[in-house]
Image (cartoon, coloured by chain):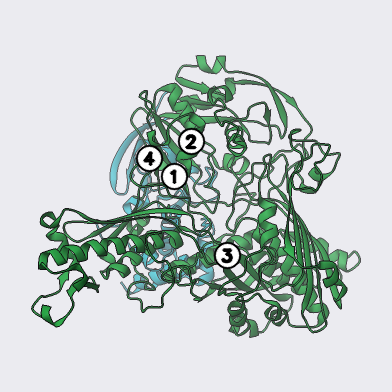
Amino acid sequence: MAGVAVSTTINGDNVEYLCQPDETLLDVLRDRLGLTGAKEGCGTGDCGACSIILDDRLVCSCLVLGAEAEGRRVETIEGMAHGDRLHPLQQKFLEHAALQCGVCTPGFLIAAKDLLAKNPDPTEEEIRFGLAGNLCRCTGYDKIVRAVQDAASVMKGA
Amino acid sequence: MNFDPRYSGRNFTSVGTRPLRPDGVDKVTGRARYGADFNMAGQLVGRVLRSPHAHATIRRIDTSKAEKLAGVKAVITAADLPDLTDGDAAMYDILDNCMAREKALYDGHAVAAVAAVDARTARQALKLIEVDYEVLPHVTDVDEAMKHTAPLLNDAIFTEGLEEKPAKPSNVTKRTQFGHGDIHEGFGRADFVVERSFKTEQTHQGYIEPHACVANVSSDGTADLWVCTQGHFVYRQHCAQLLGMEASKLRVTSSEIGGGFGGKTHVWAEPVALALSRKAGRPVKLVMTRDEVFRASGPTSATSIDVRIGARKDGTITAAEATLRYSCGPYAGMWAEIGAMTAFACYRLENVRTVGYEVLVNRPKTAAYRAPSAPMAAFAVESAIDELAKEIGMDPVEFRIRNAAQEGTRSSYGPVYGPIGIGPTLEAAKNHPHMKAPLGKNQGRGMACGFWFNFGGQTCTDLNIGMDGSVSLAVGTVDVGGSRASLSLVAAEELGIAYEQVKAVVADTSSLGYNDMTDGSRGTFSSSMATISAARNAIKILRERAAQMWDIPIDDVVWEKGHAIAKGEKYGNLAALSLREIAAASGKTGGPIAGHSELVADGAGVSFATHICDIEVDPETGATRVLRYTVVQDAGKAVHPTYVEGQYQGGAAQGIGWALNEEYVYGKDGRLQNPGFLDYRIPVCSDLPMIDTQILEIPNPNHPYGVRGVGETSIVPPLAAIANAVSNAAGVRMTHIPMSPPRILAAIEAERGGRWSK
């Protein structure tokens, strides 16, 4: 099958790649571009471990084709910190121990970033429903919610 | 053992603090490498062909068309994994489960595998493999499988543990029995007796990371395996045996692990990936899909349990018995046995008997799931305990306190307890503000207790001191939830240095001696014991070197707060030598400084917890909401309290999912109907409240710091605590887990004699 040439922006960098027409954006990120921060937990859009932001919209990259990234802006976990300066959400996830195994963490951070961009001052319930598309099996979500609450208050003050 | 592991009280400097974990930044930036995040040059993609039938004889497999497809580099069947198990029945079962031999025994059982240049070619190749099945009658239900009329999975199985050897084969592999006293006499003295039957459905650990590995077999007979596992040394042993290799020729490196909860204690894809790599002569990456994880890894048992408990009017239990039937999948297990051991472990009983039956069914081979077998037994027992308290007219907490096991109690499974935490967790629960909070309409409160043995096992740790005085700690227990932080704290504590001066890593199988898996809540317990021992060995060398530098006898040198100190007035002019100073001089005083430890970490202290929860039940729909949840558990000593809380919360959340939602649903055709996270629904963020935790510390006398394992016990009480809460809210006893809305609604309607009326 002939490859599709794609020109896109990932974490602010111009990127070009060839992919198969039926190849997911998740597979392109992981297998072609070496960006393995997004994880495949299910491949069916149920776990959120592959969450990315596509043109300001939170999506599961396993449900997007690589070819669909043409001309769009992709944000992944690899672009969240600035150099060695962690994003407040990353810092608060560490401080609150909001991760145990950590495999869902990139997806949660991306989803939480999207949530706070749209709602900088969420209630606990809004956080819980805002992150309901991401599965975590280790933490029971308690420390994740607290980390997001803490990050929101830090970011409001910034 | 080369040191004294007994507990001695001390004031801690590092242990008990809450520093950031050393692997944290990599995990919040996406840099941490999990099973599927590793690649090798020239790597092929492996895929597995799986049986669509629950039970079928494999008459013939024709791989010739697949082999001819361009891009296919290897196709394997059971013929490529010959039986080298040499009469080891358990290993033979592992082999047969990795690749079906004569029969496919469940929907999803591997029958062949391919390695190809890319995923698309591999998928095409699977479609070209022709398998001629003779479909056989199947059985997936544990009670059905015990009937004499049930289809037999294995006609060479005759039930073990019966007084007389049975004449006919059976799906029951084994009967086990525990207990003491005379239950007939005990029930004879009872004023009240409660007798109930319970069922729990099969659940999956639900780790978010599917099984993944990269295998690379070289033509010189050596091999490397990169894999997400809870125990890379055990994987090495199993893979080496199944492939006919010497263990030392196979280096296994454990990746970061994206959850395991017992489910990554067993090989499935790894021997297959190695066999594919051996045949193709190239590295092979094999990653399971989520569908495969559900259908063909190792979920927990489905169970059917009968409980009978009798008590006097004053609330003293006089006798207790339980019969427990646990599904094992198609191979023998010891799941009912563990359930039978744990069922009444919380209580001080004169007369107790439990009987377990291991039952074969056409479902995937049961694997451990966090305190395996205990939650179902606790569900049955703690539900019956609540009912009995009600019949007597006693508060359920007071009833449990009155009968709780204590130090010196002979446990229902045999051993006599040392200092234990069941009484203290019950007292803490009784006094917790949660117990006194008001409840609204359609809301109920429940509580329950739980027990887990904890495990110690073989452990090996290296502690290497660099020339700059920084400390590398190499451990062999896979870090599933923050143990590198805990073990760094322990090393810092023992050496008297800063936490930041220690860097802990999980070493591969060629770099360290054998370690058992991270299971049985043993990671921090056993590796901290080995770390303390290794640190003490290093301190002995540090003292020797300081003595040499000062030219004084070693007996005059003590180690305090990270420094060698010459004791006695005659050495008043000798300034203390720091670890860094001694390390810097090591090249001139005898070379590198290190401490090693190899031990069997005996004496894992048993663990108890008490949980409280409030549930609201919608009587119109049977839907539930968890309003409030509190965990009280004994940690012995919490090394890193934040991660101990995390274990309590995570176990509770898994238990909540099990209690209310999660279940394997098999169709009449014996196929799994819900192999995905959409239809097998684990709790999401909006399903849960904050989970309150209270850590109690009753030191384990068999560990220098008093540590007990903390990982598993938290999943034991939730099924029962929630069942008690739902039963109180709905006014009807729930006896079937999960308590999904249709089951609750049906129970309410049955109680009201048909239609629910307000």
Residue B189 shows which numbered tag?
A: none
In the image, are marks 2 and 1 on the same chain? yes
Alpha-carbon span between mark 3 and mark 4: 33 Å
The mark that comes first in sequence, 1 or 3, is 1
Query: What residue is pinned by disc 1?
Result: B232
Q: Amino acid at mark 4?
A: Phe
Q: Position of residue B685 (x, y in %)?
A: 54, 63
Alpha-carbon span between mark 2 and mark 1: 10 Å
Q: In this orientation, does residue B637 appear?
A: yes
Q: Is residue B341 above or below residue A11?
A: below
Depth-wise, is mark 1 or mark 4 nearer the camera?
1
Q: Is residue A106 above or below residue B745?
A: above
- Please identify which colour was used for chain A in the image: cyan
Quadrant for residue A155, please give it.
bottom left
Q: Residues within 10 Å of mark 4 (few under 14, many from 20)?
A: some
In the image, are marks 2 and 3 on the same chain? yes
Q: Position of residue B110 (x, y in %)?
A: 60, 32
Labelled pair 1, 3 in contact (Cβ < 8 Å):
no
Query: What residue is pinned by disc 3?
Result: B713
Query: Which chain shows up in green?
Result: B
Which residue appears farthest toward the right when viewing the image? B753
At 52% across and 47% down in the image, what residue appears?
B264
The mark that comes first in sequence, 2 or 3, is 2
Query: What residue is pinned by disc 2?
Result: B239
Left or right: B430 with respect to B267? right
Query: What residue is pinned by disc 4?
Result: B38
